[in-house]
Amino acid sequence: MKPILEVKNMTMDFGGLRAIDNLDLFIDKGEIVALIGPNGAGKTTFFNCITGIYTPTSGDVFIDPDGDGKKERINNLKPNLVTRRGLARTFQNIRLFSSMTVLENVMIGCHAVTKAGILGAIFRGPSTKAEENLIVEKSYNILEKIGLAKYVNELAVNLPYGAQRRLEIARAMATEPFLLLLDEPAAGMNPQETLELDALIMKLRDNEGISILLIEHDMKLVMSLSERIYVVDYGKKIGEGTPEDIRSNPVVIKAYLGEEIEEDA
Ligand SMILES: Nc1ncnc2c1ncn2[C@@H]1O[C@H](COP(=O)(O)OP(=O)(O)OP(=O)(O)O)[C@@H](O)[C@H]1O
């Protein structure tokens, strides 16, 4: 089995600032992998380079959804095409359509990968009506899986914070990804919400077969979920391995000044 995502020698410069410095990373099918590092280490920039928001200065991004060796280089694809290839992401700050319902937010995710697209859904003709019914059904099913079905007709803005964050995951799921990129999914959550998120991410992997790459500062969550962890600092990889390897890696501990790596902190 080949990796489903392979990043080779990625570098991203913003003028004189090297935000990512010759980074390699891979993800195997069914893995939950974390990308951690101090503030400003380059984690979100890395996601932006993988998802077509930025074109990396150099390096390659390959996907191979089935892990069968038929890999595709996706560096130069626009974000909507990256989504269509099966990479979905959430953002550090909540980006929901707050005046739309929970169901509509997920439907938007579905439309991102349908033939008619989002415009087709707005100016709907007869051919898109049948598709629309299927999308309502599909969206509802996703909400059930994510535990949000009870909010289906609520406006997104009225949801509790933790549920809004889960709705972002539901919308990403609607694009039928093989790989989900989560940017600080637990940010701002209380301990109970974080526990529920932990269970949800496990479920997505175990029941839906989706591989996951997450950026997260909550070390307890990272250590509990991840099979492997990459640590970056100033854009460079400074550590890589299992949670046990990372916990005891002196370079990593130094980068965190011995603070955040403490899971009880
Ligand atoms: N569009 C941009 N233009 C210029 N500099 C940028 C841009 N985006 C990010 N940077 C810089 O690149 C570096 C990495 O930023 P990035 O947001 O990727 O870090 P991060 O690891 O995600 O941080 P955090 O954990 O705080 O979210 C920072 O120095 C940041 O200021």
Image (cartoon, rainbow, N blue to C red):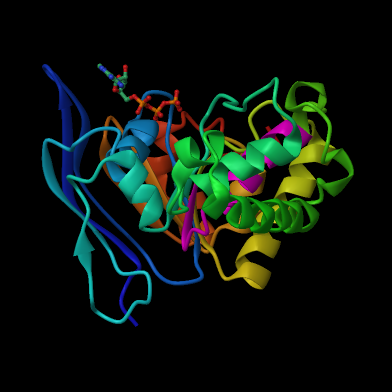
Of the pair 186 and 128, the residue shown nearer to us:
128
**Quadrant field for ligand 1:** top left
Q: Would residue 38 be found to the left or right of residue 72 on screen?
A: right
* Residue at 26% over, 40% down: 78
Asked whether the viewer can see residue 118, the reply is yes
Asked whether the viewer can see residue 219, the reply is no
* The magenta stretch spans residue 172: yes
In the image, farthest residue toward the front: 126
Image quadrant occupied by the N terminus: bottom left
* Residue at 40% over, 70% down: 28
Determine which quarter of the picture holds residue 99: top right
Q: Would residue 134 be found to the left or right of residue 61 on screen?
A: right
Magenta span of residues: 163-181
Image quadrant occupied by the C terminus: top right
Q: Is residue 157 above or below residue 22?
A: above
Of the pair 106 and 86, the residue shown nearer to us:
106
Q: Is residue 165 above or below residue 170?
A: above
Of the pair 256 and 89, the residue shown nearer to us:
89
* Residue at 78% over, 47% down: 195
* Count of residue discs: 0
Expressed as whole percent of the image width and height from the top left, the position of residue 259 reads 56, 30
* Residue at 62% over, 68% down: 208
Expressed as whole percent of the image width and height from the top left, the position of residue 36 reads 45, 41
Of the pair 251 and 206, the residue shown nearer to us:
206
Expressed as whole percent of the image width and height from the top left, the position of residue 9 reads 15, 50
Expressed as whole percent of the image width and height from the top left, the position of residue 18 reads 17, 27
* The magenta stretch spans residue 111: no
Q: Would residue 65 be found to the left or right of residue 258 on screen?
A: left
